[in-house]
């Protein structure tokens, strides 16, 4: 099991961490907009689900930005459009019974724009909603943003038959390999040009190098790929949003090298991770070298997905200061509740991670998994570091393994504390490999208490796979 029980004042580190929370939240302030409305139908948009409203959105956003900003109102109806490019000081307000439905015509997502694909910068098809170097941006209302991804459009590019791909059709594998190889060779980003004739899916909402962002109240569904993925952004609030989609890699919310983020009161039902915190992939992540930090996750409900709250695997720029509080996870189609993904190709540091008041009503695989052998395994030169993980007031039902933590011998996972945790009906209580400074306090698994070192050590032989 390779576990060392070393005394550590983890309680002090944990307390200091939670004391940071209010300070972080005080820095996350939703943007405020001028009290001006621009109703999209007054600028040529028709909500009949057929008329192309791309130019109307472009026109009204440009006009509003030119006079200092305001609220772009989308009234009831179905508005078909190409990509929507935000400018500063714009609140896109999607009214109740309004649907913005994004076109499936690829040429509308050209010309290419700078974005990230799986943590690597490139020029590619535009995300469906996009900004670059803008500030004070919002999407609000009770309407729907429909990415219109399906088994005939976008999703087959994954190259899997369950998403509509058929033998002989093109898919993303070759382009993905080419892009990743370019990044490893440090090819200029301007030369990494994909788009037409290539098969790398864009994200749905990707605000890029922007700040002061609010997404509130809307439903977001059926993205080509990741659904909300701000990159290199700061001061983000995601509140009362429903994020639904069962296509390939349709993660719900993926902050990528972002700072000061809160996501709260949201509903997830996804084909991949519900929340995945990222910071760039391999050489490209190290080139930019900006961590994802000060991430607050509160009062969310998570159903289907590969992971509920995930860190990685695009982690080369590091992640620190993550606070998850009062979240509920409930689906046998949710593989893992809490998941860390890295390896020695990714590298990076994962530190200061705080999970509190988590309820896992049902789960498919592990409650918590920390894995340094994700995908490529230990074949790189960038040894990851994982430290300071605190799990408190966790209650779970079912699952194959409670806690699974696996690290390399040269870089053990250090300073891990489980406190006031109760796991019911889990098949294997825990599996640990190369973990140091591990503390259990009031941990009950399948009716057995694992507080004392003696009780813990006596059960090691029962926890092997």
Image: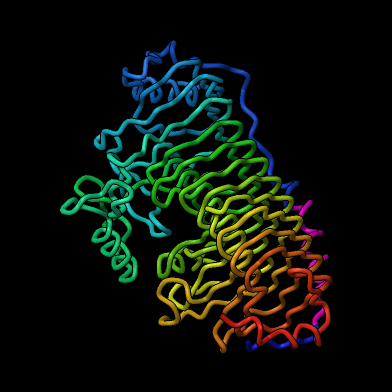
Q: Is residue 316 above or below residue 248?
A: below
Chief SS of the magenta region: helix
Q: Where residue 101 appears, x then y in whole percent?
A: 40, 28
> Would you place residue 275 above or below residue 288 in this image?
above
Residue 183 or 347: which is nearer the viewer?
347
Residue found 28% across the figure and 52% down from its top:
161
The N terminus lies in which quarter of the figure?
bottom right
Task: Please give the name of the residue rendered at 57% of the width and 67% of the height, measured from the top-left corner.
Answer: 340
Whether the magenta-drawn stretch holds residue 14 is answered as yes
Q: Quadrant of the C terminus?
A: bottom right
Asked which quadrant contains residue 367, the reply is bottom right
Pick the residue in front: 203 or 236: 203
- Horizontally, residue 58 falls left or right of residue 321, namely left
Determine the residue positioned at 79% across, 51% down: 22
Side of 11 relative to 413 (left or right):
right
Q: Which residue shows up at 74% across the image and 50% down it?
A: 326
Look at the image and say whether residue 151 sits in the magenta stretch.
no
Q: Which residues are magenta?
A: 8-23
Q: Quadrant of residue 167?
A: bottom left
Q: Position of residue 389 (x, y in %)?
A: 69, 70
Tell which of 147 and 214 is nearer to you: 147
Q: Residue furthest top?
A: 42
Q: Position of residue 437 (x, y in %)?
A: 73, 82
As drawn, 90 above or below 42: below
At which x and y percent is residue 429?
Answer: 67, 73
């Amino acid at each position: 099991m390779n576990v060392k029980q070393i005394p550590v004042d983890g309680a002090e580190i944990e307390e200091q961490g939670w004391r940071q929370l209010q300070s972080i939240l005080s820095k996350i302030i939703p943007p405020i907009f001028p009290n001006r409305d621009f109703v999209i139908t007054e600028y040529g948009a028709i909500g009949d689900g057929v008329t192309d409203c791309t130019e109307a959105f472009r026109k009204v956003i440009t006009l509003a930005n030119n006079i200092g900003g305001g609220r772009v109102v989308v009234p009831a109806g179905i508005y078909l459009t190409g990509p929507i490019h935000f400018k500063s000081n714009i609140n896109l307000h999607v009214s109740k019974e309004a649907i913005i439905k994004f076109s499936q015509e690829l040429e509308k997502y050209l010309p290419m724009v700078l974005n990230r694909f799986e943590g690597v910068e490139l020029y590619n098809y535009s995300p469906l909603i996009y900004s670059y170097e803008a500030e004070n941006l919002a999407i609000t209302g009770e309407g729907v943003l429909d990415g219109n991804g399906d088994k005939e459009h976008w999703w087959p590019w994954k190259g899997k038959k369950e998403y509509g791909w058929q033998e002989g059709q093109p898919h993303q594998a070759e382009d993905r390999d080419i892009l990743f190889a370019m990044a490893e060779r440090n090819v200029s980003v301007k030369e990494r040009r994909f788009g037409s004739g290539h098969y790398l899916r864009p994200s749905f909402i990707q605000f890029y190098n922007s700040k002061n962002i609010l997404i509130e109240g809307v439903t977001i569904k059926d993205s080509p790929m990741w659904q909300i993925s701000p990159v290199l952004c700061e001061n983000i609030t995601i509140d009362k949003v429903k994020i639904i989609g069962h296509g390939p890699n349709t993660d719900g919310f993926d902050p990528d090298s972002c700072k000061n983020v809160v996501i709260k009161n949201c509903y997830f039902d996804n084909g991949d991770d519900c929340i995945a915190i990222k910071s760039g992939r391999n050489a490209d992540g190290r080139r930019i070298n900006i961590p994802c930090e000060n991430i607050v996750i509160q009062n969310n409900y998570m159903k289907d997905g590969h992971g509920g709250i995930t860190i990685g695997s695009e982690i080369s720029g590091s992640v620190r200061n993550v606070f998850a509080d009062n979240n509920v996870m409930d689906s046998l189609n949710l593989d893992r509740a809490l998941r860390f993904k890295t390896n020695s190709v990714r590298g990076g540091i994962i530190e200061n991670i705080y999970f509190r008041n988590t309820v896992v009503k049902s789960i498919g695989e592990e409650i918590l998994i920390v894995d340094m052998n994700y995908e490529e395994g230990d074949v790189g030169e960038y040894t990851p570091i994982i430290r300071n993980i605190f799990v408190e007031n966790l209650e779970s039902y079912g699952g194959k393994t409670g806690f699974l933590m696996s690290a390399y011998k040269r870089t053990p996972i250090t300073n891990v504390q489980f406190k006031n945790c109760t796991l019911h009906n889990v098949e294997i209580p825990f599996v640990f490999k190369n973990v140091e400074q591990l503390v259990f306090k009031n941990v009950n698994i399948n009716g057995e208490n694992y507080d004392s070192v003696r009780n813990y050590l006596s059960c090691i032989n029962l926890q092997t796979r």
